[in-house]
């Protein structure tokens, strides 16, 4: 039985999922997870497919807590969070969203770099590989520097998931050392602001053999003093709720982490890794 709370998953409110919330809940209960936090996408101004990730936040923040009240038990809880797509020019917009609703956790994620999503091959064609990685981390640093209303940084090396899909391995795989100056700054900013770094297992669905971010990043974060981590499988369908969670406690404990954190009403709570 996996004892980790899955703090990153998507349902039918997200533009990229059709899964009813109940299907996710039933799967998580079947796995014996202690809880889940629904974190549907809000990516305003998503230029690749306009409107795709516009979230009906009113309806979402009414419906999920209603279901949570009905379906939570002594051993299983359901929280309501959100995954905000960060873009430097949207800081004010996202601040308003963060303050206007009662979320348990806000995941800040970079899905767009100069309005292009590394999910698509066109990103690499327009930017070139090396430059694409650099721009991605530069924009991430800009986001985490100027935006404060988030709790954890989602899938920090998200770009790797798709670079390995679209390019031959020798080109698509980044060298950690090449971007270390930037990634160090991102991590130091998180630590200074008391934000978490997310360990996201959605990576395993993209031919990667480690979480996002990879072990090298997690080690570096720990070395720099980072202790706050959150965990999520980024499931869009029931079969990937809690995906690869059984491997995480040992992997994280080997790095030095003793716990992970869940957020309730934006306040972190320490949870044991076992
Ligand atoms: Zn994401
Ligand atoms: Zn996600």
Image (tube, rainbow, N blue to C red):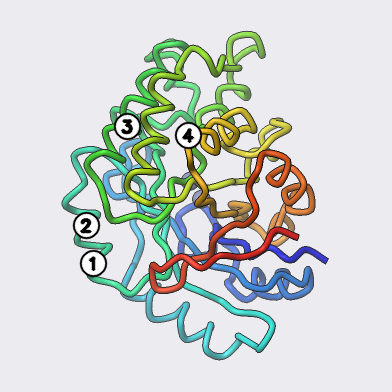
Secondary structure category for the residue under label 2: helix
Q: Quadrant of residue 267?
A: bottom left
Residue under label 2, please give it.
95
For marks 1 and 2, give the CA distance: 6 Å
Residue at 16 percent across and 51 percent down: it is: 92
Local packing at callout 2 (Cα closer than 10 Å; few below 14, some 14-19, many 20+) is some
Say if mark 1 contacts mark 4, CB within 8 Å. no
| Of 237 and 31, the residue lying toward us | 31
Residue under label 4, please give it.
224
Say if mark 4 contacts mark 3, CB within 8 Å. no
Q: Quadrant of residue 25?
A: bottom right
Asked whether mark 3 and ligand 1 are closer than 8 Å, the reply comes as no
Give whichever of discs 3 and 2 has the lower sequence position. 2
Residue under label 1, please give it.
99
Q: Position of residue 80 (x, y in %)?
A: 46, 71
Residue under label 3, please give it.
141
For marks 1 and 3, give the CA distance: 22 Å
Secondary structure category for the residue under label 3: helix
Give whichever of discs 1 and 4 has the lower sequence position. 1
Say if mark 1 contacts mark 2, CB within 8 Å. yes
For marks 3 and 2, give the CA distance: 17 Å
Q: Position of residue 106 (x, y in %)?
A: 39, 59
């Amino acid at each position: 039985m996996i004892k980790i709370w899955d703090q990153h998953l998507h349902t039918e409110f997200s533009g990229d999922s059709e899964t009813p919330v109940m299907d996710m809940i039933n799967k998580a209960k079947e796995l014996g997870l202690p809880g889940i936090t629904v974190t549907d996408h809000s990516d305003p101004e998503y230029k690749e497919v306009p409107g795709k990730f516009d979230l009906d936040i009113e309806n979402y923040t009414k419906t999920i807590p209603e279901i949570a009240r009905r379906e939570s038990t002594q051993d299983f809880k359901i929280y309501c969070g959100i995954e905000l797509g960060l873009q430097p020019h949207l800081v004010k917009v996202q601040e308003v969203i963060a303050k206007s609703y009662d979320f348990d956790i806000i995941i800040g994620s970079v899905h767009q770099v100069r309005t292009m999503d590394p999910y698509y091959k066109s990103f690499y064609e327009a930017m070139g590989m090396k430059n694409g990685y650099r721009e991605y981390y530069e924009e991430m640093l800009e986001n985490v520097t100027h935006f404060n209303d988030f709790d954890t940084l989602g899938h920090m090396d998200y770009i790797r998931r798709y670079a390995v899909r679209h390019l031959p391995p020798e080109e698509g795989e980044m060298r950690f050392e090449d971007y270390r100056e930037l990634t160090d700054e991102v991590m130091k900013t998180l630590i200074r602001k008391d934000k978490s770094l997310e360990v996201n297992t959605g990576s395993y669905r993209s031919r990667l053999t480690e979480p996002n971010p990879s072990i090298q990043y997690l080690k570096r974060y720990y070395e720099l003093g980072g202790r706050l981590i959150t965990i999520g499988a980024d499931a869009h369908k029931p079969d990937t709720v809690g995906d690869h969670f059984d491997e995480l406690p040992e992997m994280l404990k080997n790095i030095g982490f003793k716990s992970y954190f869940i957020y309730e009403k934006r306040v972190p709570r320490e949870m044991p890794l076992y």
